[in-house]
Amino acid sequence: NSDAIFAYLRAQPAVAQANQAQALRWPYNSQWALGVWRALYFRSAGFKPDATKPESWNRGAYLVQGLGHCSACHAQRNALGASANALALSGGVIPQQGWYAPSLLSRSEAGVQDWDTADIARLLHGGNSQRATVSGPMAEVVLHSTQYLSNADLAAMAQYLKDLPAAPLAAAQTK
């Protein structure tokens, strides 16, 4: 358990090693650049529940929009790396990885609006369901994060994701 590991590490002798200088390149290595970016794009805000929705839906919205930070991958970014619309979940390229995180609004990509909520929860918990299998960075999300969520939290996320507005299918896809 983690307490035993912590106790073991605390019992180890200290190592004398000087701190290494940071190796970030410009502009990531400057505090003023971070300050400018924060002034342009960061807005401190708390979660505001939707009073017209049930408590479980709001729990799912809180998890997807906040703690799960799904928009970190599933939202488009501008030239400076800020989410174009953090709550859009309309798909985007993951910075530094070149991996496309598909739109959660489009049924032709990763939208789950026509899925059963049990299948959505199963996908988030185990990485596969009767409808799909995750891969790439989303497989890491399942491995390191969502597989550990409670059944109630998985069901809440599934309810919220299922209720996202579906983007209209492109004319070429409906023919």
Image: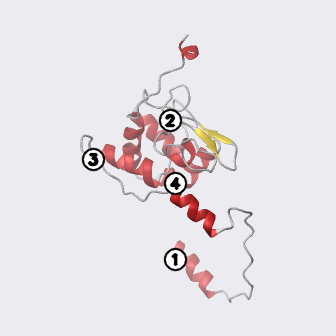
**Sooner in the amino-acid sequence: mark 1 or mark 3:** 1
Residue lying at 53% horizontally and 55% vertically, measured from the top left: 40
Camera-near label (3 vs 2) is 2
**The C terminus - image quarter:** top right
**Residues at marks 3 and 2, CA–CA distance in whole angstroms:** 22 Å
**Residues at marks 1 and 3, CA–CA distance in whole angstroms:** 35 Å
Q: Which residue is mark 2?
A: 104
Camera-near label (2 vs 4) is 4
Residue 6 position by quadrant? bottom right
**Sooner in the amino-acid sequence: mark 1 or mark 2:** 1
Q: Residues within 10 Å of mark 2 (few under 14, many from 20)?
A: many
**Coordinates of residue 172 in the picture (x, y in percent):** 58, 14
Q: Residues within 10 Å of mark 1 (few under 14, many from 20)?
A: few
**Coordinates of residue 65 in the picture (x, y in percent):** 43, 48
Camera-near label (4 vs 1) is 4
Q: Which mark is residue 51?
A: none
Q: Secondary structure at mark 3?
A: helix
Q: Secondary structure at mark 2?
A: loop
**Residues at marks 2 and 4, CA–CA distance in whole angstroms:** 23 Å
Residue lying at 54% horizontally and 42% vertically, measured from the top left: 75
Residue 162 position by quadrant? top left
Q: Which residue is mark 4?
A: 41
**Sooner in the amino-acid sequence: mark 2 or mark 4:** 4
Q: Secondary structure at mark 1?
A: helix
Left or right of 116, for residue 13: right
Q: Are marks 3 and 2 in contact (CB under 8 Å)?
A: no
Q: Residues within 10 Å of mark 4 (few under 14, many from 20)?
A: few
Q: Which residue is mark 3?
A: 55
Q: Are marks 2 and 4 in contact (CB under 8 Å)?
A: no
